[in-house]
Amino acid sequence: MQHCIRRATWLSFVACVLPWAAASDLAYAQRDRADSEATAPIEAWPVRDNVYVLFGASGNITVSIGPSGILLVGTGLEDQSAAVGAALERLDRKLSVSGAPKRPLRYIVNTSVHPEYTGGNAALRSLQAEAASVIAHEKVLIRLVDQNAPFAQLPTTTFGDGEHNLAAPFNGENIRLIHMPAATTDGDAIVHFRGADVISTGALISMNAYPPIDIARGGSINGLIEALNTILKIAIPGVGGDGGTLIVPGHGRLADSADVGAYRDMLTIIRDHVQYLIDSGMTLDQIQTARPTLGYDRRFGSAAEPETIEAFVEAVYRSLAAAPR
């Protein structure tokens, strides 16, 4: 490896390093697939304190459940709403004493406009007489209105750039929403459960896929990397495998700050590789042929769906081509 690095150009250096990274990640990719298969249909798994995660939907759904009621981060696709509602009922019964009333759904948080995080808004709100409040960044509302989403799917409370905190502690802890501008879209946010020390990232992180950077909706590779850096500033590393901030990604298994750092590093290497190819005068088609993501495709790509890899590379290319150097 040292001989390869010493004599290689930047391009050949990447070619040497990335396959090695893919080999080390193969076991994690296999575990991610096993987790996905083991948790279908939708099942609730404990994270910490009052925070749970629903695995098996189109995207992970973070749940805060306790005396204050239920708060959801994400709602899944619309056609999964019945299964999500059933999973919430099972979780509520499991945590309730005999004869206790059903906990109401008080809040829904949309961390982005992507359909796996907003699609079930209307259906889940209709499960009870008093509809839950839907909170999102104002850009999520604008994007949903632009695509003629049903009124019941739209956020009822929006916030601007910066932070938004729930007005009162929910299930015994303060919950804050932090806007991440120009990440996968211009309306992304993370949710930090401060008491449990859990961060729900939505589309910003996936443990088994490349992120869905939507250039048309204000996303960019540099903004996404900056968002991950912000998460790393908030998250506390564990010591000896214990403690530390727990991360609920948009897809895949639970993570920690080390996983976030590895995901950030992967995106940074791919970004720099694509930038090098752009600076070398290569076109998008030529860059696609060069396969700048090759070393990570076994974990984050899908051989059955190569178009997802191509779409990611194109998004990185277009966001870099449009950005000032």
Image (tube, grey):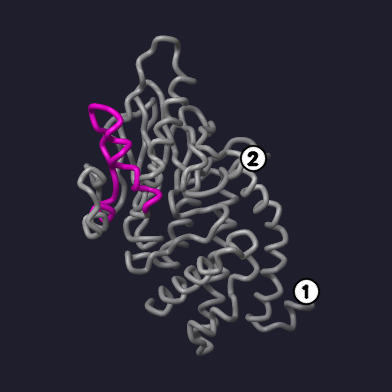
Is 56 left or right of 81, judged from the image as shown? right
Residue 237's image quarter? Answer: top right
Is 198 left or right of 243, judged from the image as shown? left
Residue carrying label 1? 2
Residue type indicated by callout 1: Gln
Q: Position of residue 163 (x, y in %)?
A: 31, 47
Question: Helix, strand or loop at disc 2?
Answer: loop
Residue 221's image quarter? Answer: bottom left
The stretch of residues the image draws in magenta is 115-141
- Of residues 314 and 260, the one nearer the viewer is 314
User: Given the current orientation, which residue lies at the most extreme bottom position?
Assistant: 281
Q: Position of residue 113 (x, y in %)?
A: 33, 54
Q: Classify mark 2: residues with Cα within 10 Å, few (<14), some (14-19) or many (20+).
A: few
24 up-or-down from 68: above or below: below
Q: Position of residue 134 (x, y in %)?
A: 27, 40
Q: Give the residue drawn at x 48%, y 33%.
A: 52
Q: Give the residue drawn at x 43%, y 34%.
A: 63
- Of residues 116 and 5, the one nearer the viewer is 116
150 up-or-down from 43: above or below: below
* Alpha-carbon span between mark 1 and mark 2: 31 Å
Q: Classify mark 1: residues with Cα within 10 Å, few (<14), some (14-19) or many (20+).
A: few
Residue type indicated by callout 2: Val
146 up-or-down from 151: above or below: below
Question: Helix, strand or loop at disc 1?
Answer: helix
Please state, as top left, top right, bottom left or bottom right, where the C terminus lies in the image.
bottom left
- Which of the labelled discs sits on residue 239, or is there none? 2
